[in-house]
Structures are given as structure tokens and as C-alpha cells.
Image: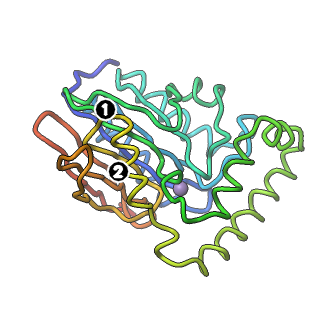
């Protein structure tokens, strides 16, 4: 059933959906059913899932999420997806069955007359050299071909090992290393000749003011979904970060 859409777009990131967090999944399904159909576009800026081992992985949990996304897409809301550092292996098959349009890692979009840059945000954290090295390797065709050739149980084990390693490494890295490099933000806005950047990844929801292109600019950081639903509402009148509580 088609809904009449308002001229409003929503942005979300860092839901980190996982089978062992049914509270997050319930909140997201409720968001997709009640809130998101009002919007003409939903941008998912990465880390929708805690990890992704390939589109050939299936489970009732993944099907439930995929079906709910497809249902939203069938109401007429366009769903765009940019990969995060956890779910960069989401491929065309899952995107198609969920009614999502895959975007490149950085995209310049037009939002009601404003040129806006959207991305996951991990590429801005240039001080985290170890992570950037892994990122480069894991985006190569040979690494991805190698991973996809492994049986699912082995990929699942590797993903879990990587999560543990990553959590241990994150615990000892400084807050500064884990955050974006300000000069990268400016460089990016100047490259795209834009005054607004929207990203996730750092889990530090905030609207930052800065200068780029010798003019005032802003950087919006989306919140994660560990303790509540969180999204950015964007329309002709401006934008705001919103939250919804977990119901149960
Ligand atoms: Mn991330």
C-alpha cells in the first residue's frame, strides 16, 4: 500500500542489529512500521548489523529485518544504504531483497536544495592507522573473494573473533584516535563544495559547527541504537536529532 509521503528524509546509522539484542530489533521494526513510512527517503549510513558474513547467510532474524525493510520500500519510501565497517559485505542480493539502493562509500545528495555529503564516517578517523590498514585490505577484491570462499561457520567464527579483537583494541585506543580528524571533515566538505556532512560510526550524536569553504558549515553525527532508537529528521525547515525509547 502506498502512503502519501511528506517532504522529509530520515537518517540512521549504527543500529548494530544482532540476534542477541531483540530489544534493538523490536525498536527498529517499530520505527520501520510507524515512523519511517512518513518519510520519502530513509538513509541508512552503515552498521545496520553488528556484523555481516555474506548475503548467503540466512536466518529467521535476518529475514524478519529484510521483510520489514521491503515492506517500507513498498510503501514508496526510498531506502538508501551506505556500508559501515561492520557490514561492508552486504551485497546486491540482500539489498535487492530488502528494497534498498546501495550507494558508494561517500555520496553527495541534494536535500531540498542543499548539497549534503553522507558517509558512514570511518574514513574520517585517519588517526586510527591500524584500522585504516585493515579497511584498505578488507575492501580489496582478493580479500573479499577469499572470505566469501570460506564456509559460513568459519566466516561466523572469524567475524566473532574480529569483534573481540576490535573491542580489545578499542578499549586501549585514546578517545582522540577513535574520533574523526577535523581537517579531514573540512577537506571532504571543500572537495564536494558542501556545507553539511552527515555521518555515524563514532556513536557521539551531536551537531558540530565548523568553517569550510570559508563559510559556516555543520557536521551531524548520528546516534547509535544501543539504548534507544535514534534518527535525524531533515526537511525544508531544517533538521533535528530525535530519539525513541525501547518499548519493552
Ligand atoms: Mn561503524
Mark 2: secondary structure:
helix
- Mark 1 Cα-neighbour bin, 10 Å: few <14, some 14–19, many ≥20: many
Q: Quadrant of the C terminus?
A: bottom left
Percent x, y of residue 86: 62, 52
Q: Residue at x 29, y 57 (%)?
A: 244
Percent x, y of residue 111: 25, 30
Which residue is label 2 attached to? Answer: 186
Of residues 20 and 140, the one drawn nearer to the viewer in this rendering: 140
> In screen coordinates, is 61 left or right of 144?
left
Q: CA distance from mark 1 to mark 2?
A: 34 Å
Q: Which residue, as the protein is rendered here, is positioned at the far front? A: 214
Mark 1 vs ligand 1: CB below 8 Å: no
Mark 1: secondary structure:
helix
Percent x, y of residue 196: 27, 43
- Mark 2 Cα-neighbour bin, 10 Å: few <14, some 14–19, many ≥20: many
Q: Quadrant of the N terminus?
A: top left
Q: Which mark is residue 20?
A: none
Q: Are marks 1 and 2 in contact (CB under 8 Å)?
A: no
Amino acid at each position: 500500500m502506498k502512503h502519501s509521503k511528506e517532504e522529509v528524509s530520515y537518517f540512521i546509522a549504527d543500529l548494530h542489529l544482532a540476534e542477541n539484542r531483540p530489544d534493538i530489533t523490536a525498536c527498529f521494526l517499530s520505527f520501520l512500521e510507524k515512523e519511517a513510512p512518513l518519510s520519502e527517503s530513509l538513509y541508512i549510513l552503515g552498521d545496520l548489523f553488528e556484523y555481516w558474513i555474506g548475503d548467503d547467510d540466512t536466518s529467521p532474524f535476518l529475514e524478519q529485518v529484510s521483510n520489514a525493510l521491503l515492506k517500507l520500500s513498498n510503501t514508496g519510501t526510498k531506502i538508501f544504504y551506505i556500508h559501515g565497517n561492520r557490514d561492508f559485505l552486504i551485497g546486491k542480493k540482500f539489498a535487492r531483497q530488502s528494497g534498498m539502493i546501495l550507494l558508494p562509500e561517500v555520496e553527495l545528495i541534494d536535500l531540498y536544495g542543499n548539497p549534503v555529503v553522507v558517509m558512514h564516517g570511518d574514513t574520517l578517523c585517519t588517526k586510527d592507522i591500524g584500522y585504516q590498514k585493515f579497511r584498505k585490505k578488507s575492501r580489496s577484491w582478493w580479500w573479499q573473494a577469499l572470505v566469501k570462499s570460506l564456509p559460513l561457520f568459519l566466516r561466523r567464527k572469524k567475524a566473532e573473533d574480529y569483534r573481540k579483537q576490535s573491542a580489545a583494541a578499542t578499549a586501549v585506543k585514546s578517545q582522540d584516535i577513535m574520533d574523526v580528524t577535523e581537517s579531514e571533515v573540512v577537506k571532504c566538505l571543500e572537495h564536494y563544495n558542501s556545507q553539511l556532512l552527515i555521518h555515524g560510526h563514532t556513536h557521539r550524536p551531536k551537531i558540530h559547527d565548523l568553517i569550510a569553504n570559508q563559510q559556516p558549515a555543520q557536521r551531524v553525527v548520528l546516534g547509535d541504537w544501543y539504548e534507544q532508537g535514534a534518527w535525524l529528521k531533515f526537511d525544508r525547515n531544517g533538521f533535528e536529532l530525535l530519539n525513541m525509547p525501547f518499548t519493552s
